[in-house]
Amino acid sequence: MSVETQKETLGFQTEVKQLLHLMIHSLYSNKEIFLRELISNASDAADKLRFEALAKPELLEGGAELKIRLSFDKDAKTVTLEDNGIGMSRDEVIAHLGTIAKSGTADFLKNLSGDQKKDSHLIGQFGVGFYSAFIVADKVEVFTRRAGLSAAEGVHWASQGEGEFEVATVEKAERGTRIVLHLKAGEEEFADGWRLRNIVKKYSDHIALPIELPKEHYGEEKDKPAEPEWETVNRASALWTRPRSEVKDEEYQEFYKHVAHDFENPLTWSHNKVEGKLEYTSLLYVPGRAPFDLYHREAPKGLKLYVQRVFIMDQADEFLPLYLRFIKGVVDSNDLSLNVSREILQKDPVIDSMKSALTKRVLDMLEKLAKDKPEEYKAFWKAFGQVLKEGPAEDFANKEKIASLLRFASTAGEGDEQSVSLADYLGRVKEGQDKIYYLTGESYAQIKNSPHLEVFRKKGIEVLLLTDRIDEWLMSYLTEFDGKQFVDVARGDLDLGKLDSEEDKKAQEEVAKAKEGLIERLKGALGEQVKEVRVSHRLTDSPAILAIGEQDLGLQMRQILEASGQKVPESKPIFEFNPSHPLIERLDAEADEDRFADLSHILFDQAALAAGDSLKDPAAYVQRLNKLLVELSA
Ligand code: ADP
Ligand code: MG
């Protein structure tokens, strides 16, 4: 090896140190995956070179045949992986093999528990990669040179996977990257042709460029050729170009891990070749779990874009709407030009029609998953349901389809589990029910016994219980499903339509008339606090309730707006009372106006508390209540 110059020792970013330590221990039971990760990187490097060479063919330096070579030395206990892809410059080496660029990494690492089993799952969703080499090696060396730089600008990187690494400038004749793993004592099994061959077949068969190993040599050692003969051990064709019937599930799964940089299997996938006016192939996957950075704005999203099998870009996010940003996969177009850029993608009408077709594919795939594999759909809903709920607002055309994929907790469901679909709900509606009823709130525990549900319980009508932060906002876009309107049971003057009989309605009107005097007195006592006072038809056990005005913001939206520092328009609740409740009867009979006012305020505050709201003047509430208690005991 040639001389090293400009040698320096640098420390790993703190996050890398933590990750290295954890990974070595928690991924140990699955250690052979290090090879998959390194091959995946080599394949990405070849893709990047091919792409850059479209504009600058000289980058290929005459050698256009891209490949990966894997070799080993039993005596030296090394495994060497060499590619002739894009390579790295010195700065790139320091950035890529010394830090983790993903935003939110530090927070993510805080969640690790030290429990190896749990952590290995967490690390799986984080996706390590290059650093997995340290699972089996106690020293890793990288020799690399970026395509286009001179042979004198090669880089040598070396580390023992502890706190630091060395970089130096070296001579490197061929472009690309060579990685030498110095195996740990006990890991010598990897310096073996059969072992390596098997791992490649198992995890990397789908890699589109040839992975070569030295041909196994039988017979006398002295007859062994001086130069190894190389032999391709993988299939070496782009997986998505093969007919569906010829691709095994395991191959689809391994390919997913490569494109998604995930360690775990996807839940499902959809592979399609489209011919006709537009020609493209897509392979779309639903991941098994949410990545740690699902809600980070800069988190990677989008598909890997190929044009006629040539890699063009990662994270092409023009092909799917934002609410499907968790989908991973590949799209390979025959219509786009090879020099397509992000700017062009954003304007090209071809992209719009591909986007709507791909969106439909994803929604169909989810529908099929829900139908055929309910357990997997549950896992999907848990991981990505909240993201899917952004759909009705973003994608008007597919609103109904998205709505059918939503799952809710409900008064007829199993506890707080979000498992009820709108189709389930409609299958259970009562005779004469033409609405879909729901209630929003902060948590299941908080609303499951809400007074708003009393009349529904009495009549045996199901109510959806929506407690995700996004729900009230979602419902402002979701107005009907299958021709039935959604109705917030805490809002407006609840009209149960045909669910109330003519006699019910008549009786209600009579009561309202009879209580006009009480209504006026309550209005006087509650004054500015309420928009309106009226007799309630929705209560059986509670004395009073606060309803939200038809057009007013609900509690959840108010809280979101307040938290984001926005000015929330003032809105007053409607005070509804239950005329047959003993407390209301007692109130009606109260001749002392002061005590009447105290009682009214207590009922009002209690109704606010029951709705999950906080009191504007909690001290006044406590004072009034205590005053009453004292009178009672006197
Ligand atoms: P990821 O592949 O998810 O980006 P890795 O840890 O596997 O993460 O790799 C980190 C980065 O190091 C890659 O994104 C790439 O920029 C660089 N890299 C790794 N291996 C190679 C290689 N063989 N050739 C060129 N660059 C590489
Ligand atoms: Mg990688």
Image (cartoon, grey):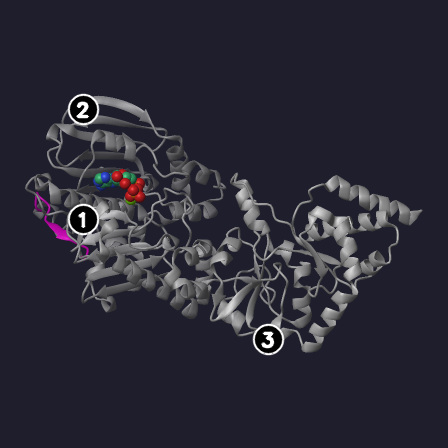
Label 1: which residue? Answer: 340
**Magenta highlight on residue 233:** yes
**Of label 1 and label 2, which has the lower sequence position?**
2
Which residue type does callout 1 highlight? Val
Which residue type does callout 3 highlight? Lys
Name the element at disc 3: loop
Which quarter of the figure has residue 411?
A: bottom right
**Magenta highlight on residue 448:** no
Q: Check disc 2: other Cα within 10 Å, few if <14, some if 14-19, many if 20+.
A: some
Which region is colored magenta?
225-235
Residue 176: image x %, image y %? Answer: 16, 39
Answer above or below: position of 114 versus 540: above
Label 3: which residue? Answer: 430
Residue 462: image x %, image y %? Answer: 60, 68
Label 2: which residue? Answer: 4
Name the side, left or right, on which 248 lies relative to 478: left
